[in-house]
Amino acid sequence: MSDTLFPFFNSNSDKVALVEGENKHTYSEVNDRINLFSSGILGAKEDLNEERIAFFLPASLDYVTTMHGVWRAGGIAVPLNVASAVSELDHYLTCAKVTRLIAGTQYHDSLKGLCNSLKIELLSVSDVMAEEPRALPLINPERRAMMLFTSGTTNKPKGVVSTHKTICAQITTLITAWEWSERDVIPLFLPLHHIHGIINILSCGLWAGATVHLFSKFDIPKISKQITHGTYNVFMAVPTIYVKLIQYFETIEKDEVDKICAGFSAMRLNISGSAACPVKLFEQWKELTGQILLERYGMTEIGMGISNPYNGERRAGAVGQPLPGVQCQLFDENDNVVERDSEPGEIRIKGDNVFLEYWENEEATKSSFKDGWFCTGDVAVVEQGYYRIMGRSSVDIIKSGGYKLSALEIEGVLLTHDSISEVAVIGIEDDIWGEAVTAFVALKEGTALEFDSLKSWCEGRMSSYKIPKHLKLVDALPRNAMGKVTKPSLKELL
Ligand code: MCA
Ligand code: AMP
């Protein structure tokens, strides 16, 4: 059972695990709370037997209680994006066959209708808590533990299922590689429905006995203030966050900038990941803070795969070497191993860190593995011993501010607009977001479309970060002889 392996939860430690605003929670207090939650969610059952319990909670003590509570009771934890549109939630809840949804009371009114229609019990954490702890099941590490939704080259996001063993492998490799310890203090402001926030920050922190400061969003002034006070010694973020920090520095007094940069400078580690870190950003950050960003590469299906070294050269524009316990190999289009340096190939991964399956999607699971290797769809080269990511094999995946977005999913929603006859969505290079969602639209005859009205129409139909940043009206989309839209040629139309 992976959860009891979190050593500090078992040690009755009075060390602070979580800081939430003015409130501090010790490991022993959090541990007791988790046990009461597990006892309550079990009710009369001995074991949840992989029942899917979803939760709609921002970063909070309640989130940690629910995640670990579900694990200890033998359920599958399904953390949801609190910024989701209702239509997206419908898909997640239906696909995972969720039975109970734990949500903050502030969300109950907006979730009630959906839960009623899907016959899902809507609860708050306090509804679940038992008065007394009870015996909890022993859980085989091979059992399913968590489901995260990931966008792919198909229309709807797929549920990526990891086991207790997967999660344990993903955490422990990072604890070793990045030298986590109980002396660490880290801010957590990333969303908690993705590996970056869940595993790299929250779970590694709690496993190591560190202190994790929880923020419901990336609140630059608040977080910067703590940084000037020297509160944190580790900082992990997506490249967009480093860009936004640098932009923020341009809006405040130099004296203040110097204090924040000194706070960063004193840290033991600054990490960038989830999307490519431009060399220019790497250099700017070094110049401002003296920190040499450690860039690493990961994916929902594998956790972290490749990382620049903690000790040793961290190379700009490269992601380093495979992490301990992770097997990594590049393959060409004919599935042959790429033997020579500087020749590109698809990254394929093996190891205990790799997920179990796409939930109830045998076909997708099967086609994503070849000879036991998980095929990431990312193309890389090895140069003087360092992997460098060159891009993805699909134009239908967009990385915006660290979020992986499916062009097809966005197109599917836009096509339901009354004025749109055809649409193609791609990512266009962008200094802040990495890639900006851009929609090429052909209109139905006799109709017109303003960008602002399209954006308003999108609200509530998709999460706000998926809404196109640019709209280009075209007479018709460029197509090849087979009638397929030639997406690479769209950029030329801008
Ligand atoms: C916010 N907006 C965005 C994005 N985020 N637009 C495009 N892409 C985005 N990622 C838009 C909002 O819709 C809004 O638009 C406006 O920006 C301001 O929103 P706000 O929420 O205030 O922005 P923010 O707080 O500055 O958010 C930026 C962010 C956030 C903090 C960078 O996007 C974020 O947390 N990204 C990280 C996601 C992540 O953790 N990914 C890891 C998955 P409007 O004003 O028009 O309403 S990848 C992973 O886990 C793998 C394993 C890995 O390798 O790590
Ligand atoms: P997700 O499935 O949302 O976790 O996103 C995983 C994808 O993010 C990978 O398949 C890569 O395309 C991309 N990614 C993650 N880290 C990096 C990185 N350091 N450089 C380039 N791309 C990255």
Image (cartoon, rainbow, N blue to C red):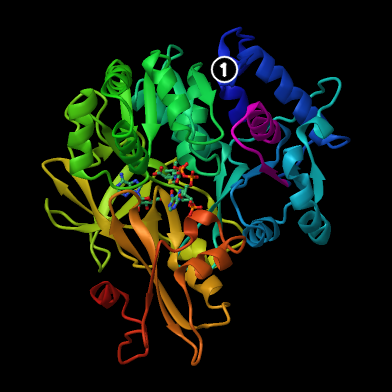
Which residue lies at the image location 58% right of the left edge and 77% below the top edge?
A: 416
Find disc 1 in the rendering and name its residue.
17
Which residue lies at the image location 70% right of the left edge and 41% below the top edge?
A: 75
Task: Using the rendered view, name the quadrant where residue 225 is placed.
Answer: top left
Density class for disc 1 (Cα within 10 Å; few <14, some 14-19, many ≥20) is many
Please state the extent of the stretch shown in magenta in the rendering: 52-71
Work out whether residue 41 or residue 244 is closer to the camera in this orientation and state it. Answer: 244
- What is the residue that sits farthest to the right in this orientation? 44
> Is residue 420 highlighted in magenta?
no
Residue 236 point in image, percent of width and height? 38, 31
Q: Is residue 350 left or right of residue 391?
A: right
Amino acid at circle 1 = Ala
Which residue lies at the image location 81% right of the left edge and 35% below the top edge?
A: 42
Quarter placement of the N terminus: top right
Residue 489 point in image, percent of width and height? 26, 77
Q: Is residue 45 left or right of residue 239?
A: right
